Image: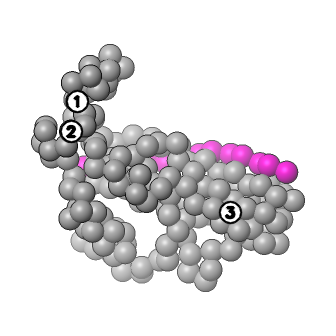
Amino acid sequence: MVHREEFQVQSNDKVCTFHDVTAQAKEIVARSGIRNGIVVVYSHHTTCSVITQECAFDRSMTGLETLQQDLVDVFEDWIPTCRREGQYLHPGPKALVFAEEHGEDARGCHNTDAHLRSSIIGRNVTVVLIDGQMDLGEFGFIHFIDWDQTRARKRTVQVMVIGE
């Protein structure tokens, strides 16, 4: 059997946004009726990632959990947030023209850092489903990350449950 649902999350601008989507994924699993198999949580957005991680309990001064802040900080050192034109080769002149033709402003196109971060972390996780429960371990949570800091927007989280 295969069961698929999706839902929306609202991301913020000027910061990387982490969404704990564990509860929604568990609700979808329950509605699916599937007891054993896999659960795939996926983003089709090329500037977003999906990860599993434990709760860090503490929060940084930015409001992120400390493990989330550490991840953002590591990426900031490795792949700095795009803050000026020409910092990265992308977007080039053709990409900017294409974006303008599709209603996107130049600032929104300067999200190369988000594309690179997403390509490294990945855009999905697969979790084993045993007796109707996702096997996330004792402390596991599923987080949808929007790396794109150019603007606030709605993002779609897709969940597919496959099994019997």
What secondary structure characterizes most of the magenta part?
strand
Q: Residue at x 29, y 26 (%)?
A: 95
Q: Is residue 12 magenta?
A: yes
Contact check, label 3 and label 2, Cβ < 8 Å: no
Residue 144 vs 45, above or below: the answer is below
Quadrant of the drawing holding the C terminus: bottom right
Q: Which residue is label 2 attached to?
A: 89
Name the amino acid, label 3: Lys
- Residue 109 is at least partly visible in this image: yes
Q: CA distance from mark 1 to mark 3?
A: 42 Å
Give the camera-side residue of 15 and 115.
115
Choose mark 3 or mark 2, whichever is in front.
Answer: 2
Q: CA distance from mark 3 to mark 2?
A: 41 Å
Give percent across and percent down for residue 45: 47, 42
- Residue 13 is at least partly visible in this image: no
Contact check, label 1 and label 2, Cβ < 8 Å: yes
Q: CA distance from mark 1 to mark 2?
A: 6 Å
The residue at the far bottom in this view is 138
Q: Which residue is label 1 attached to?
A: 92
Q: Secondary structure at mark 1?
A: loop
Q: Residue at x 68, y 74 (%)?
A: 135
- State which quadrant residue 132 falls in: bottom right
Dot 1 or dot 3: first in sequence order is 3
Name the amino acid, label 2: Leu
Circle number at residue 26: 3
Give percent across and percent down for residue 57: 42, 80
Q: Secondary structure at mark 2?
A: loop
Magenta region:
1-14
Locate residue 67 relative to residue 73 in the image: left or right. Answer: right
Give the camera-side residue of 12 and 83.
83
Name the amino acid, label 1: Gly
Give percent across and percent down for residue 71: 33, 68
